[in-house]
Amino acid sequence: MTIRGSRRQFLGMMGGAALAAAMAGGRQCLAAETGLDFPLVDLHVHLDNSTIDKVLELSKERGVKFGIVEHAGTKENIYPVVLSNDEELLQRIALLEGKPVYKGIQAEWTDWMGCFSKEAIAKLDYVLTDTLTFPGKNGERMKLWEKGAEIGEPQYFMDRYVDWHVEIMTKEPIDILANVSWLPQPLASDYDAFWTDARIRKVLDVALKYGVAIEISSGFELPKLHFLQMAKEAGLKFTFGSNGRYPKMGLLDYSVRLARQLGLKSSDMFTPAPDGQKAVQRRTWQGK
């Protein structure tokens, strides 16, 4: 099954009895059609160029609950919106309060904790980050997806890149590592050669140590199956993510397909922790 169409299109293809059941069951029924034993949740959704009300309409149509994240860190991080202090963060939380969504941030660089109090971050359901902003030769922020990013010798870069994964998960109180195993364009065609078992294992060992969930990204169609098989064998938790901006959020075909191949169950999936057990509360806090 594909989930790229709207919920209305999906229901239109079903017979009478199944249609009635789907209308009664809503999101739970639509999720059941994937062959998975858990409802669909996209924890990597941005509000860029949209409103919460429009995004909630898509959530209902697609039968996918959303987790809304906003980039968070210093203003040196260039995005349409960057939350940089408690006041801005609490305003965003207030915008989502009472809405049927999870509330999160996409933490940027390694200095984001200095922008916020622990108490403000703990009001979120989760903290997500990735490794795509990478230290350049002089330690400056280098966005690996941008044209002109200096990769250098591929094997040396990969060793540094894996160490960067380790550093982020070791030092930052995050719940989810997103866009996992993404590679810059010059290396992407040799994914299997660069992501050796030893490198994969090094990343997974640290994720397991600190309780970091691995995102199965439908936006990038990553990680690939072997990486995810190793993650499952290691006992890691998973999330689904589209990295979607309107109207591309909630399109989780790749995530669903890989979850089926892996035989993922509800027990394999990350769910936001209750108060007192979030990463920001479990881990050492080095913020304001």
Image (cartoon, grey):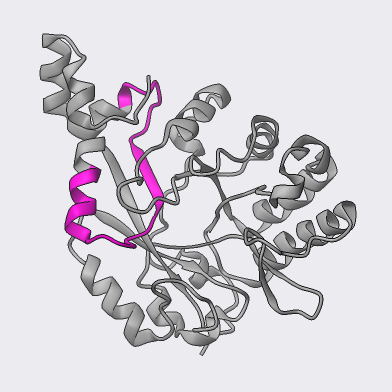
Q: Judge whether residue 219 is colored magenta.
A: no
12 or 146: which is nearer to us? 146
Tell me where residue 115 appears, x and y as whole percent. 49, 86
Above or below, 90 relative to 169: below
Tell me where residue 256 appears, x and y as whole percent. 45, 30
Q: Quadrant of residue 92?
A: bottom left
92 or 207: which is nearer to us? 92
Tell me where residue 88 appears, x and y as whole percent. 34, 82
- Numbered range of the magenta stretch: 32-59
Above or below, 122 relative to 190: below
Q: Residue sitting at 49 percent across and 84 percent down? A: 75
Q: Judge whether residue 35 is colored magenta.
A: yes
Q: Residue sitting at 66 percent across and 61 percent down? A: 147
Q: Residue sitting at 69 percent across and 40 percent down? A: 234
Q: Residue sitting at 55 percent across and 53 percent down? A: 178
13 or 258: which is nearer to us? 13
228 or 221: which is nearer to us? 221
